[in-house]
Image: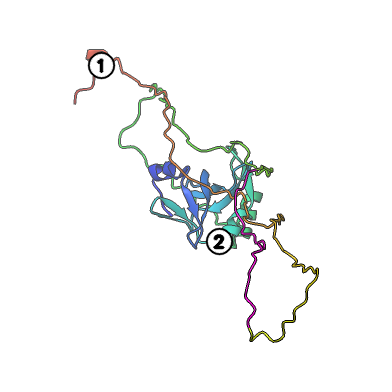
Amino acid sequence: MNLTEQQIRSLYGQDVQDRAGARIGSVGQVWADAAGEPTWVSVKTGVMGQHESMAPLTTARMEEGRLSVPYDKSTVKSAPTVDTGTDQPLDADQIAQLYAHYGMGQQPTPKPQPPPRPQGRRQPQDQQDLVRSEERLRVGTESEPAGTARLRKYVVTEDVHTTVPVEHDEVRVERTPVTSTDRDVRPDIGEAERELTLRREHPTVRKDQVPVERVRLARDEVVEDQPIDERVRRERIDADVPEPARRRA
């Protein structure tokens, strides 16, 4: 994966996705090989993690502003790690472990660099030079605690107003004249009593405990762009050359 200097700088903080398109994390740092070619990236996979998983950059590709690696998420998350924010180069043992983890075979031998070509014009023996330096932003992210979410269950009491239909017996006196057809009725003068049992209903209340809802806490990783405003220092070099010594164009 051949990248320009600008593309390498743009990798920091980019999302990293696996071969299925699932998000793994974001790019933390970039490592180059002995020839100066970018070969490895660290992937931030956790909110509170102090380590970053390593992934090969040589087999990755950029897709719509995201870095896609040809491995599944679990493979990257279980890869050898480095400390967050480290600036130490990878040693031979770390590189060997990475090649073994990703099944990439033997580590390639760096190609020898060609010797510098001779200049067309000899430089004077008394040449004096200055090194101009400048500051460049290295933007990344760092995880920190942002609070604690918890579920707490407690009991509240509320008034419930409802109605329930209840029944009761009421008595009415019915009088029916005895006719000649009522042959089973015999005259019987004397005292007598009859009783009728009356019934009524009254409300009753019973409380049943029933489950009504399941509540859980779920965490989603949300990625958003946060602006960064910072000042960097840059050196400038002005040449003060006497007019007789100026080279004519």
Determine whether, in the image, residue 164 is placed left or right of residue 12: right
Q: Nearer the viewer, residue 158 or 240?
A: 158
Span colored in magenta: 158-179
Q: Is residue 71 above or below residue 185?
A: above
Residue at the spot 47% in from the left edge and 42% down from the top edge: 12
Q: Which residue is mark 1?
A: 245
Query: How far from the left and from the top, in percent, is residue 35?
Result: 49, 47
- Dividing the picture into quadrants, the one containing residue 185 is bottom right
The disc labelled 2 sits on which kind of residue?
Answer: Asp
The disc labelled 1 sits on which kind of residue?
Answer: Ala
The 10 Å Cα crowd at callout 1, few under 14, some 14 to 19, many 20 or more, is few
Q: Nearer the viewer, residue 159 or 178?
A: 178
Q: Main secondary structure of the magenta part?
A: loop
Q: Is residue 75 above or below residue 114?
A: below
> Coloured how?
rainbow
Q: Which residue is mark 2?
A: 72
Asked if one can make out residue 239 in the rendered structure from this viewpoint, the answer is yes
Residue at the spot 66% in from the left edge and 84% down from the top edge: 182
